[in-house]
Image (cartoon, grey):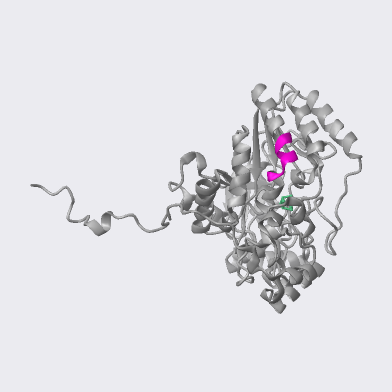
Amino acid sequence: MRSTMSPALGPEKAEQPLLYAYAPARERSEPDWTRIPGFRGVSRAEWEDATWQRRHTVKSVRELKGALGALLPDDLAEGIALDQARRATMSILIPPHMLNTMDVAELWSDPVRRYMLPALADRRADWPDHPRASRDSLHEHDMWVAEGLTHRYPTKVLAELVATCPQYCGHCTRMDLVGNDVPAVTKLRFELPQQRRFGAMLDYLRRTPTVRDVVVSGGDIANLHITQLEPFVSALLDIPSIRDIRLASKALAGLPQHYLQDDVLAGLERLSRKAFERGVDLAIHTHVNTAQQVTPLLAKATRKLLEMGFRDVRNQGVLLRGVNATSKDLLDLCFALLDHANVLPYYFYMCDMLPNSEHWRVALFEAQQLQHDIMGYLPGFATPRIVCDVPFVGKRWVHQVAEYDREKGISRWTKNYLTPLERGDPEAMRRRYDYYDPIYTLPESGQAWWRRQARAGEHAESHGALDA
Ligand code: SF4
């Protein structure tokens, strides 16, 4: 009998190269909160109560010390305090549930700690900022068509309803608006009273039938009482041109207890029913960055939403060095979301070019490699796209780049629609728009080029930079 195997391809050669080993799903349990000194006597009923969680949310290094006790190393406490004083763009706000997803025995290296509670030593001392970084790096406010309503894409808008969240992430893209003032950043504030602001958004959408998708966000919609959220979303459902509504809430992972409250569930169920009757897709988008944040309570909240008819619960994570920027970390997270929580991996955003964010950002070539490396393991519909949110352009898949100067770390992108900012600008569609790699990832010649730019104080225009 003839062997079907070529001698050149022995059994060992035919095996999968072990780039990623999928671990079949096993049951997960909620991390034991009583291992944390400040939560030692807390009952399950208290833990699962959203009001208890909000009352015990950590808002300062002193409260962090109170919760973690001796588990918080002194040098880390000092580093977080120094960071708050000098570099942080977000204040400290972390619910007990989220604190409990950290490896409290290894807080310095824990990925959730690294993005929720940054210490000064985490940041780059050489280039804490990219010279082109800015607050509101996506220029969302410049594209407001009503206060808090960004119309950036032809058929889609973003409605920022509230400027607070139950938790504050160190890398928040909306650091310009969201959260409390910190020494490094005085936040913008909405000026209109809430009802007038919501009314102006709805008026714009009623008279703009080309908009079919609305992302209802903030901040985090979990910080809007259901008696305020429900009428707004219900009014959206009354606008015949709106066919897709996505509610954005990191709290689904950070404070899932919020989504297990009777009044919240009742309000969301009414919205879900109305959306179904009108043939509108209503979904939740959440923001989970690491597999360890996928807990049974997140899964329980997600299932409630799916049971009541939400079209989907999808994850939009952020790609962050030191947190999840390896193919293993990304795949572990995606499989955890799928296997344990019925959450669909959707996007990973490259971290935006915000002040003091260089240590988290990855270069475009690294993001392209990660996209390559995660292909083929997940179901196609659940394979997330890694996207770069290019200023004045919008989301671009990382392989859509038009030009890429690896030496200076400047990528150039094209656009295929106009934002309100470019109406009347005949060059807008022909122009190329720049994005920048972190300088420390560049070859020495590229780093020297940026040092010369900094020394000369010349922040050359991006096209000039490429042509230089
Ligand atoms: S939950 Fe979202 S909006 Fe709120 S701080 Fe985090 S990233 Fe920013």
Q: Is residue 158 magenta?
A: no
Left or right of 89 on screen, residue 435: left
Q: Is residue 265 magenta?
A: yes
Does residue 388 lie above or below 441 as drawn?
above
Does residue 289 lie above or below 124 as drawn?
above
Q: Residue 375, position in %: x, y?
A: 46, 47
Q: Residue at x 66, y 37 (%)?
A: 430
Q: Residue at x 62, y 51 (%)?
A: 297
Does residue 129 lie above or below 5 as drawn?
below
Q: Which residue lies most toward the bottom here?
A: 74
Q: Which residue lies most toward the left here?
A: 1
Residue closer to the observer: 460 or 271: 271
Q: Residue 442, position in %: x, y?
A: 59, 64
Does residue 374 lie above or below 72 as drawn?
above
Q: Report the label total.
A: 0
Q: Is residue 256 visible?
A: yes
Q: Residue 33, position in %: x, y?
A: 64, 63
Q: Quadrant of the C terminus?
A: bottom right
Q: Which residues are magenta?
A: 260-267
Q: Quadrant of residue 354?
A: bottom right
Q: Residue at x 78, y 71 (%)?
A: 81
Q: Is residue 133 visible?
A: no
Q: Residue 440, position in %: x, y?
A: 63, 66
Residue closer to the observer: 67 or 427: 67
**Chief secondary structure of the magenta span?**
helix
Q: Quadrant of residue 424?
A: top right
Residue closer to the observer: 93 or 353: 93
